[in-house]
Amino acid sequence: SCVAVMEGKDPVVIPNAEGKRTTPSIVAFTEDGERKVGDPAKRQAVTNPKNTVYSIKRFIGANFKTDANEVSRVPYQVVEGSNDTVKVKIGDREYT
């Protein structure tokens, strides 16, 4: 993901806290309840795969039943929400 503002007629990309111009769309939940976002979360993907959410954009507007193939491609738990929507379950919480 990338965020920019217009300065006059030119877009200027705003760097993230690590000084990078893009931030991975990843969120990780650690065992102690901390949430990590972006590159720190990406580093959790290997050691904490069931609690690291990535490629979530593929589920925007998706139907749980018809997109079951996509659900099987991620290590985190994807569950059916109301009206055949997709939710992510981390621990005892569900996220939309």
Image (tube, rainbow, N blue to C red):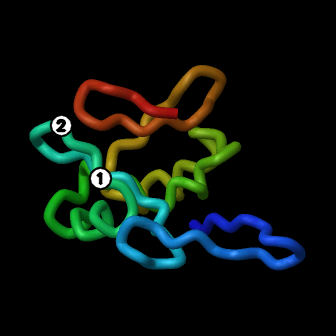
Residue closest to the far left: 32
- Number of the label disc, if any, that sits on residue 93: none
Q: Who's the residue at 48% across and 61% down the image?
A: 25
Where does label 1 land, which residue?
36
Q: Residue 96: where, in percent of width, then height? A: 52, 33
Residue type of the residue flagged with mark 2: Gly
- Relative to 15, 32 lies left or right: left
Q: Amino acid at mark 1?
A: Lys
In this rendering, would 60 be left or right of 40? right
Q: Is residue 4 above or below residue 84?
A: below
28 up-or-down from 73: above or below: above
Decide: few, some or many residues near mark 2? Use Cα within 10 Å; few <14, some 14-19, many ≥20.
few
In the picture, residue 62 is in which quadrant?
top right
- What residue do we see at 72% from left, 65% from top? 5
Residue marked by disc 2: 33
Question: What residue occupies the far right of the structure in this picture?
Answer: 9
Q: Is residue 42 above or below residue 49?
A: below
- Of residues 13 and 38, the one drawn nearer to the viewer in this rendering: 13
Do tag 1 and tag 2 residues touch (Cβ < 8 Å)? no
Q: CA distance from mark 1 to mark 2?
A: 10 Å
- Mark 1: few, some, or many residues within 10 Å (few <14, many ≥20)? some
Residue 18: give x, y in percent of width and height.
Answer: 36, 72
